[in-house]
Amino acid sequence: MSTENARPSAVSSGPNGKQRDSLASEWRGFSFKRFLVLIKVEIYKMANYWVIRGGYIAMVGIGLIAAYLTFHIEQAAKLTSGSGYAFAIGLLLRGIDIGASIIFLMICMIFSTEMTFGTIKNILSRPVTRIEMMLAKYITSWVMISVAIGIFLAIGLVMGKYYYGMGDLTEDGYLLFKRSVMFKEMAIAMLLLMAPFIALSALAMMISSLSSTMGGAMIIGLIAYFFFDLVGIIPNNLGMTVAGHFIPYHVFGFPILRFVPLTILDDLPAGLPITTWWVADIKNMLLVCGIYFLVFFTASLVIVRRRDFTL
Amino acid sequence: MREAVLEIRGLSKKFGEIQAVKDLNLTIQRGDVYGFIGPNGAGKTTTIRMILGLIHADAGSVRIFGHDLHKDFRATVSQVGALVESPAFYPYLTGYRNLSLFGDLSGGVDAERIQEVLKLVGLSRRAKHKVKGYSHGMKQRLGIGLAMLARPKLMILDEPTNGLDPQGIREIRNLIREISRQGEITIFLSSHLLSEMEMVTNRIGVMSRGKLIAEGEVGKLLGGAQDRVEIRVDQELKAKALLESKFPGLALAVPRLGWLEFKQENRDLSKINATLVQAGMAVHSISSRSRNLEDLFVELTGESKDVY
């Protein structure tokens, strides 16, 4: 009746005694088609969650109110943006300022909702590895960021066109830039704008992967977001010298770097051409955001791989 | 010997100082309906989570249909359908949509299969309603539906009847019987409803304090057991004291008010009856019954209410 608990001939344990799948096993049997399905499922879940929808509705509301107020404040002060492009870029700057914290909190939910609802056990008891799941969630977060930026850009362009028009950029009848040039430069700026947001998404995902509840993820997320955001406004002359190089503290505040592409773009409606985007500020932004992304991204994957899901 | 569907060797897990599972060895063969029982905190759910890879084992191995869980996760898990403890769904989506999303992750699940499963678990009419409006029993049904959705070869059900009404319990019991009768699906079932387990399982394993303390075919485990005698009597505590003094070694228990119970052990029941009657106690009935799974469970794990 009693069992004979014979020891197995070989027991393999990972570091600190725990057994884990090898990294190679994560990719054994990987199917790109199934990965696309996983991304589709992730996007569907987020798109249908009322909190996420609420976040986007809030962004639309903020964008519309900001557009209305900006125009009427300009009118009252007898100032004008001068062109629909300047109006759109100005609105995008304001929208990105506020919208970043909203999208950050929304990304904090991507993983933590699975913990709150307990659905993580349903996902991981399917042929979906932990890294695969996280990568799908990362891609979902980038789609969410694109939608958020798209909302502010769309409102800026539509309202800019409504108030000032959106033809070729001219001054006193002289052509400054053709419309196609304006849109091309704006598109490049939007692509570059993704860099700080991708770094932000990694921070949000790391916090989310550490949390057991959505509320916890959002509270810790808010604290982390405002910490890094505040670090970004430290004056340039404060910093440290490493191996002869002066590193200002403000570069550690990577969320503030989201304004870099837009401030460069902001010169364009004034008639100043952008000869190259490959300037020191952009290089610095990409470097700092790239480092932050790698650190947070790696940490989030390690956390999820090592975690025991006892829901 | 039938094919081994699930092989667990030397599985161990510690949470801090608590040894949740220790050196567990288990083999489940094709067609088994294996009952996994044990008191709260015995390590049943931890074991199930380790089988599914939700928890990392400190040591040991899990093989499903010959595939090692740690080396070939996808091939292993793709053959398993599971309901782990309480069912979990996206409350803002409908029951149908929840199954559809998880079905997409499993692959090979079409709309027809989802409808079929919803019908099997009795949720066809509520399929288009959001899960947040479901009762616990309905979520439980949906959880069972999710476990069987991708036509798994091994179903792991942790407390599948939890929260169900008597009719629901009966339906799930019949469903498990029906699935096992077809012989294609092996079922690993954990439950506290021992009477249910006795009715549907062919083999059981008893866990206590992280160890498997007994395992075997239900019939064999209960077969060697002695019958139990139940006496319905007034003043059961007084009667217990009297019988214990007159019949040394007689292990009496009071299972409920007005009842005494002890192992048959070839005792002369007429003498016991006479002793009680002569002491002026009214004996309403004396009957014997076979030992059931609950008796075995209590014998093996004790009456302690402490959670380990």
Image (cartoon, rainbow, N blue to C red):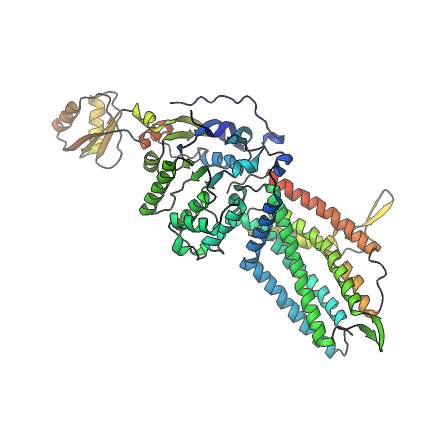
The quadrant holding residue A190 is bottom right
Q: Residue at x 21, y 33 (%)?
A: B236
Residue A236 visible in the displayed image: no
Foreground residue, A142 or B298?
A142
Q: Residue at x 40, y 32 (%)?
A: B32
Counting from the top left corner in percent of width and height, residue A94 is at: 71, 65
Location of residue B201 in the rendering, given as x and y in whole percent from the top left corner = 36, 33
Residue A83 placed where, x, y %? 77, 73
Depth order, front residue of B46/B215? B215
Q: Is residue B231 left or right of residue A179?
A: left
In this orientation, which residue lies closer to the viewer: B57 or A83?
Answer: A83
State the residue at coordinates (82%, 58%). Answer: A277
The x and y percentages for residue B156 are 45, 38
Outermost residue, right side: A244
Instruction: State how many labels appear.
Output: 0
Please give the name of the residue rendered at 39% of the width and 56% of the height, measured from the top-left corner.
B125
Q: Quadrant of the N terminus of chain A?
A: top left
Figure check: A92 above or below A29: below
User: Is residue A150 in view?
Assistant: yes
Picture layout, residue A130 above or below residue A156 = above
